Amino acid sequence: MDIHHLKIFVSVFKNRSFSKASGKLYLTQPTISGHIKSLEEELNCKLFDRMGRTVIPTKEAEVLYSYAIEIIEKADNIKNVIGQFKKEPTGELIIGASTIPGTYLLPSIMIGFLKKYPAISFQIIISDSRDIIERLLKHELLMGIVGAKLINAQVRNESLINYIPFMEDELIVVSSPSLITKNKVRLQELIKYPVVLREEGSGTRKETERILGGRGVKIENIKISGIFGSTDAIKQAVKEGLGVSILSKLSVKDELKYSVLKEIKLTDIEMKRKFYIATHKKRTLPLAYNLFLEHINPIKPSPA
């Protein structure tokens, strides 16, 4: 079976479109159609039903997709293994990351990694934790760094994800300097103020709910003044006095330094969480990914 046929099939399957696959692979649409037709003839089955500009995979295509991913992956891994005999490892590293690690941790980590392996290219895709896990399950990513473990109720088939503890993070309460004059409060006093939150797919939001829930405080019993899809938007809302928020200390380091935001310490609760490296249990990591894991291992904290 031609590996090139399979790569084109995978692109059509993912994009649900011959024209989109054509654009991504820099091939003409007739060429794409020709490869799919050859594959269908070889397997003696139909792989896609055409519905206007959209194509719908058949049951046979659903089965072939998981095998095709595995075959392509193993073929690429052969190149990577052979590449180990070269002086300089090559390859591409695509990492999905939730907002905090993607914005505040990975840039400095990648600088150190590329000094060791300058021939490896990389791309960081930033989204919320739930989206990163869903992309791993759809085989759109091989590795993610997220701020929370997601349970089956939140993401289907999440049990197929392997979580490796990576680094500890501290969540803190922040306010505009004018909204709360005290420097320390108890949790029950804090929840009297309006609260600005991240969206539900966010790892920070999930960990906030988990920590507060452990103290008997439910999100639905808090006065929520706004929900935003990014940490930057929340910081701006808090600066404007819309309410208080619970954010990663990493994300507000500069704002605290210049007194744009104020940290309100909770006297009766400490808020810690871990970042995790997430991978699919059934996927084989290419050389570039394994080298990255080896690179970041020294900075991984010892188990608590």
Image (cartoon, rainbow, N blue to C red):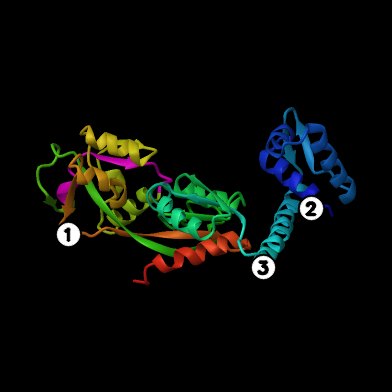
Give the residue pinned by disc 2: 3
Q: Nearer the viewer, residue 27 or 209?
A: 27
Which of discs 3 and 1 lies nearer the camera? The answer is 3
Residue 143: give x, y in percent of width and height.
54, 56
From what the image shows, is residue 82 above or below residue 142?
below
What kind of element bears circle 1? loop
Residue 288: give x, y in percent of width and height.
58, 59
Marked residue nearer the N-terminal end (2 or 3): 2
Rendering quarter of residue 160:
bottom right
Read off the magenta span.
188-202
The circle drawn on residue 85 is: 3
Which of discs 1 and 2 lies nearer the camera? The answer is 2
Q: Residue at x 23, y 35 (%)?
A: 239
CA distance separating discs 3 and 1: 56 Å
What kind of element bears circle 3? loop
Give the residue pinned by disc 1: 268
Q: Are marks 3 and 1 in contact (CB under 8 Å)?
A: no
From what the image shows, is residue 53 above or below residue 8?
above
Residue 156: give x, y in percent of width and height.
55, 53
CA distance separating discs 1 and 2: 59 Å
Q: Is residue 140 visible?
A: yes
- Density class for disc 2 (Cα within 10 Å; few <14, some 14-19, many ≥20) is few
What kind of element bears circle 2? helix
Q: Amino acid at mark 3?
A: Phe
**In this figure, what is the number of numbered marks?**
3
Farthest residue, direction front: 87
| 138 in magenta | no
